[in-house]
Image: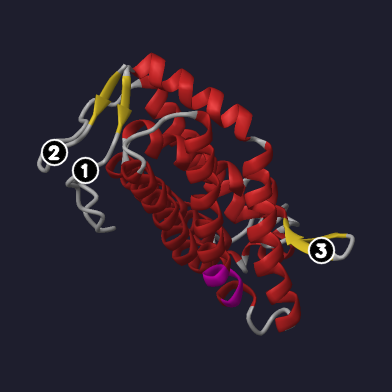
Amino acid sequence: MEKVTPAPGEGRKKVTIPLLALAVTFVTCLIVANLVEIKTVSLGWLTVTAGLTVFPVSYIINDCVVEVYGFRVARLVIWLGFAMSLLVALFLQVALWLPGDAQWQGQEAMEMVYSAVPRIMAASFAAFLCGSMVNAYVMSRMKAAAGGSSTAGSFSLRAIASTLGGEGVDSLVFFPIAFGGVLPWGTILSLIVSQALLKTAYEVLILPITIAVVRRLKRVEGIDTVDAGISYKWWRVGDV
Protein backbone atom coordinates (compact mmCIF):
# COMPACT_ATOMS: atom_id res chain seq x y z
CA MET A 1 0.00 0.00 0.00
CA GLU A 2 1.31 3.42 -0.93
CA LYS A 3 1.73 6.01 1.78
CA VAL A 4 0.85 9.29 0.10
CA THR A 5 2.09 12.60 1.50
CA PRO A 6 0.68 15.34 -0.73
CA ALA A 7 3.10 18.15 -1.54
CA PRO A 8 1.96 21.75 -2.02
CA GLY A 9 0.49 22.13 -5.48
CA GLU A 10 -0.05 18.40 -5.87
CA GLY A 11 -3.28 16.55 -5.23
CA ARG A 12 -5.35 13.57 -6.05
CA LYS A 13 -7.15 14.37 -9.30
CA LYS A 14 -8.67 10.97 -10.13
CA VAL A 15 -12.20 10.35 -8.89
CA THR A 16 -12.63 6.63 -8.28
CA ILE A 17 -15.86 4.67 -7.86
CA PRO A 18 -15.36 4.15 -4.08
CA LEU A 19 -14.73 7.88 -3.58
CA LEU A 20 -17.75 8.77 -5.71
CA ALA A 21 -19.93 6.37 -3.72
CA LEU A 22 -18.73 7.86 -0.43
CA ALA A 23 -19.40 11.41 -1.64
CA VAL A 24 -22.91 10.59 -2.89
CA THR A 25 -23.79 8.78 0.35
CA PHE A 26 -22.39 11.68 2.39
CA VAL A 27 -24.49 14.24 0.53
CA THR A 28 -27.63 12.07 0.72
CA CYS A 29 -27.28 11.57 4.48
CA LEU A 30 -26.82 15.28 5.00
CA ILE A 31 -29.92 16.21 2.97
CA VAL A 32 -32.10 13.60 4.69
CA ALA A 33 -30.84 14.72 8.10
CA ASN A 34 -31.77 18.32 7.31
CA LEU A 35 -35.27 17.31 6.22
CA VAL A 36 -36.04 15.27 9.35
CA GLU A 37 -34.16 17.47 11.85
CA ILE A 38 -37.29 19.54 12.50
CA LYS A 39 -38.81 16.67 14.51
CA THR A 40 -37.86 16.40 18.16
CA VAL A 41 -37.99 12.93 19.69
CA SER A 42 -38.37 11.95 23.34
CA LEU A 43 -36.20 9.05 24.48
CA GLY A 44 -37.09 8.80 28.13
CA TRP A 45 -35.32 11.70 29.86
CA LEU A 46 -33.49 12.65 26.67
CA THR A 47 -34.76 14.95 23.94
CA VAL A 48 -33.15 14.46 20.56
CA THR A 49 -34.00 15.15 16.93
CA ALA A 50 -34.90 12.66 14.22
CA GLY A 51 -31.71 13.66 12.42
CA LEU A 52 -29.83 11.57 14.98
CA THR A 53 -30.79 8.48 13.00
CA VAL A 54 -28.80 9.48 9.92
CA PHE A 55 -26.53 12.50 10.53
CA PRO A 56 -23.76 10.59 12.37
CA VAL A 57 -23.25 8.53 9.22
CA SER A 58 -21.98 11.66 7.47
CA TYR A 59 -19.28 12.05 10.16
CA ILE A 60 -18.27 8.41 9.79
CA ILE A 61 -17.93 8.91 6.02
CA ASN A 62 -15.98 12.11 6.68
CA ASP A 63 -13.56 10.11 8.85
CA CYS A 64 -13.14 7.50 6.11
CA VAL A 65 -12.47 10.12 3.43
CA VAL A 66 -9.89 11.99 5.53
CA GLU A 67 -8.17 8.76 6.58
CA VAL A 68 -7.85 7.39 3.06
CA TYR A 69 -7.85 10.40 0.72
CA GLY A 70 -6.75 13.25 2.99
CA PHE A 71 -8.13 16.57 4.19
CA ARG A 72 -8.25 18.29 0.81
CA VAL A 73 -10.57 15.70 -0.71
CA ALA A 74 -12.73 15.73 2.43
CA ARG A 75 -12.96 19.52 2.20
CA LEU A 76 -14.29 19.25 -1.36
CA VAL A 77 -16.86 16.61 -0.33
CA ILE A 78 -18.00 18.81 2.57
CA TRP A 79 -18.54 21.77 0.25
CA LEU A 80 -20.45 19.55 -2.18
CA GLY A 81 -22.74 18.58 0.67
CA PHE A 82 -23.23 22.25 1.51
CA ALA A 83 -24.06 23.16 -2.10
CA MET A 84 -26.53 20.31 -2.62
CA SER A 85 -28.29 21.05 0.67
CA LEU A 86 -28.70 24.66 -0.43
CA LEU A 87 -30.11 23.50 -3.75
CA VAL A 88 -32.67 21.27 -2.00
CA ALA A 89 -33.72 24.17 0.25
CA LEU A 90 -34.25 26.43 -2.78
CA PHE A 91 -36.27 23.80 -4.65
CA LEU A 92 -38.45 23.20 -1.60
CA GLN A 93 -39.27 26.89 -1.39
CA VAL A 94 -40.12 27.01 -5.10
CA ALA A 95 -42.45 24.03 -4.60
CA LEU A 96 -44.17 25.83 -1.70
CA TRP A 97 -44.61 29.03 -3.70
CA LEU A 98 -46.13 27.33 -6.75
CA PRO A 99 -49.96 27.64 -6.86
CA GLY A 100 -51.63 24.34 -6.07
CA ASP A 101 -54.14 22.62 -8.31
CA ALA A 102 -57.79 22.51 -7.24
CA GLN A 103 -57.33 18.85 -6.34
CA TRP A 104 -54.31 19.56 -4.13
CA GLN A 105 -55.24 19.31 -0.44
CA GLY A 106 -51.80 19.11 1.15
CA GLN A 107 -50.54 22.70 0.97
CA GLU A 108 -51.16 23.44 4.64
CA ALA A 109 -49.46 20.24 5.78
CA MET A 110 -46.55 20.84 3.39
CA GLU A 111 -46.09 24.39 4.67
CA MET A 112 -46.32 23.24 8.29
CA VAL A 113 -43.51 20.74 7.74
CA TYR A 114 -41.27 22.58 5.30
CA SER A 115 -41.82 26.25 6.14
CA ALA A 116 -39.34 25.76 8.98
CA VAL A 117 -36.77 24.27 6.63
CA PRO A 118 -35.11 27.62 5.68
CA ARG A 119 -34.26 28.32 9.32
CA ILE A 120 -33.26 24.71 9.91
CA MET A 121 -31.19 24.78 6.74
CA ALA A 122 -29.48 28.05 7.71
CA ALA A 123 -28.60 26.61 11.10
CA SER A 124 -27.55 23.35 9.51
CA PHE A 125 -25.36 25.07 6.91
CA ALA A 126 -23.40 26.97 9.54
CA ALA A 127 -23.20 24.02 11.94
CA PHE A 128 -22.39 21.52 9.22
CA LEU A 129 -19.50 23.55 7.82
CA CYS A 130 -18.03 24.27 11.24
CA GLY A 131 -18.52 20.76 12.62
CA SER A 132 -17.42 18.86 9.53
CA MET A 133 -14.35 21.00 8.97
CA VAL A 134 -13.33 20.65 12.61
CA ASN A 135 -13.86 16.88 12.36
CA ALA A 136 -11.72 16.63 9.21
CA TYR A 137 -9.04 18.96 10.62
CA VAL A 138 -8.67 16.98 13.86
CA MET A 139 -8.54 13.67 11.96
CA SER A 140 -5.88 14.98 9.59
CA ARG A 141 -3.72 16.61 12.26
CA MET A 142 -3.86 13.62 14.60
CA LYS A 143 -2.87 11.23 11.82
CA ALA A 144 0.07 13.43 10.82
CA ALA A 145 1.12 13.75 14.47
CA ALA A 146 1.01 9.95 14.80
CA GLY A 147 3.37 9.62 11.83
CA GLY A 148 0.61 8.21 9.65
CA SER A 149 -0.08 5.28 11.97
CA SER A 150 -2.98 3.24 10.62
CA THR A 151 -3.36 0.75 13.44
CA ALA A 152 -6.90 0.09 14.66
CA GLY A 153 -6.14 1.76 18.00
CA SER A 154 -4.64 4.88 16.45
CA PHE A 155 -7.47 5.26 13.95
CA SER A 156 -10.11 4.66 16.63
CA LEU A 157 -8.62 7.34 18.87
CA ARG A 158 -8.62 10.01 16.19
CA ALA A 159 -12.06 8.96 14.90
CA ILE A 160 -13.61 9.34 18.36
CA ALA A 161 -11.72 12.54 19.20
CA SER A 162 -12.57 14.18 15.88
CA THR A 163 -16.22 13.20 16.11
CA LEU A 164 -16.54 14.49 19.66
CA GLY A 165 -14.96 17.80 18.61
CA GLY A 166 -16.92 18.08 15.38
CA GLU A 167 -20.26 17.06 16.86
CA GLY A 168 -19.71 19.36 19.83
CA VAL A 169 -19.12 22.35 17.55
CA ASP A 170 -22.01 21.32 15.30
CA SER A 171 -24.46 21.15 18.22
CA LEU A 172 -23.24 24.42 19.75
CA VAL A 173 -23.88 26.22 16.46
CA PHE A 174 -27.00 24.41 15.24
CA PHE A 175 -29.45 24.28 18.12
CA PRO A 176 -29.39 27.93 19.28
CA ILE A 177 -29.89 29.09 15.67
CA ALA A 178 -32.50 26.47 14.76
CA PHE A 179 -34.60 26.44 17.93
CA GLY A 180 -33.79 29.66 19.82
CA GLY A 181 -37.11 31.32 20.74
CA VAL A 182 -39.01 28.19 19.69
CA LEU A 183 -37.96 25.72 22.38
CA PRO A 184 -37.10 26.48 26.03
CA TRP A 185 -33.37 27.11 26.52
CA GLY A 186 -33.22 24.23 28.97
CA THR A 187 -34.42 21.93 26.21
CA ILE A 188 -31.91 23.44 23.78
CA LEU A 189 -29.08 22.86 26.25
CA SER A 190 -30.26 19.27 26.69
CA LEU A 191 -30.28 18.84 22.92
CA ILE A 192 -26.74 20.22 22.59
CA VAL A 193 -25.27 17.88 25.19
CA SER A 194 -27.31 14.79 24.36
CA GLN A 195 -26.85 15.05 20.59
CA ALA A 196 -23.08 15.49 20.83
CA LEU A 197 -22.70 12.57 23.24
CA LEU A 198 -25.14 10.26 21.47
CA LYS A 199 -23.63 10.90 18.04
CA THR A 200 -20.17 10.19 19.44
CA ALA A 201 -21.50 7.02 21.07
CA TYR A 202 -22.94 6.09 17.67
CA GLU A 203 -19.44 6.46 16.22
CA VAL A 204 -17.96 4.26 18.95
CA LEU A 205 -20.55 1.51 18.46
CA ILE A 206 -20.02 1.38 14.72
CA LEU A 207 -16.21 1.65 14.88
CA PRO A 208 -15.60 -2.01 13.96
CA ILE A 209 -17.52 -1.46 10.71
CA THR A 210 -15.74 1.85 10.07
CA ILE A 211 -12.33 0.22 10.60
CA ALA A 212 -13.24 -2.59 8.21
CA VAL A 213 -14.43 -0.10 5.57
CA VAL A 214 -11.26 1.99 5.89
CA ARG A 215 -9.03 -1.08 5.55
CA ARG A 216 -10.98 -2.22 2.50
CA LEU A 217 -10.77 1.23 0.91
CA LYS A 218 -7.03 1.40 1.44
CA ARG A 219 -6.57 -2.00 -0.20
CA VAL A 220 -8.83 -1.20 -3.14
CA GLU A 221 -7.44 2.30 -3.71
CA GLY A 222 -3.86 1.40 -2.84
CA ILE A 223 -3.29 4.61 -0.89
CA ASP A 224 -3.07 5.81 2.70
CA THR A 225 -2.82 9.59 2.70
CA VAL A 226 -0.89 11.48 5.36
CA ASP A 227 -1.40 15.23 5.00
CA ALA A 228 1.74 17.36 5.04
CA GLY A 229 2.41 20.88 3.83
CA ILE A 230 -1.21 21.48 2.84
CA SER A 231 -3.52 24.42 3.44
CA TYR A 232 -6.31 23.89 5.96
CA LYS A 233 -8.19 27.00 4.86
CA TRP A 234 -11.84 26.07 4.48
CA TRP A 235 -12.47 28.08 1.32
CA ARG A 236 -9.70 26.54 -0.83
CA VAL A 237 -12.16 24.15 -2.48
CA GLY A 238 -10.22 23.86 -5.74
CA ASP A 239 -7.07 22.71 -3.94
CA VAL A 240 -7.46 18.96 -4.27
Badge 2 density bin: few <14, some 14–19, many ≥20, Cα 10 Å: few
Residue 30, numbered circle: none
| Helix, strand or loop at mark 2 | loop
State the residue position of label 2.
7
Q: Measure how far apart labels 2 and 3 are at the Cα level.
A: 47 Å
State the residue position of label 1.
228
Is label 1 in contact with label 2 (beta carbons under 8 Å)?
A: yes
Q: Is residue 185 above or below residue 222?
A: below
Which callout, 1 or 3, points to the residue nearer the camera?
Answer: 1
Which quarter of the picture shows residue 176? Answer: bottom right
Image x and y of residue 102, in percent: 70, 56
Which quarter of the picture shows residue 179? Answer: bottom right
Q: Earlier in the sequence, mark 1 or mark 2?
A: 2
State whether residue 119 appears in this view. Answer: no
Image x and y of residue 19, in percent: 38, 28
Image x and y of residue 133, in percent: 39, 55
Q: Amino acid at mark 3?
A: Leu
Q: Amino acid at mark 2?
A: Ala
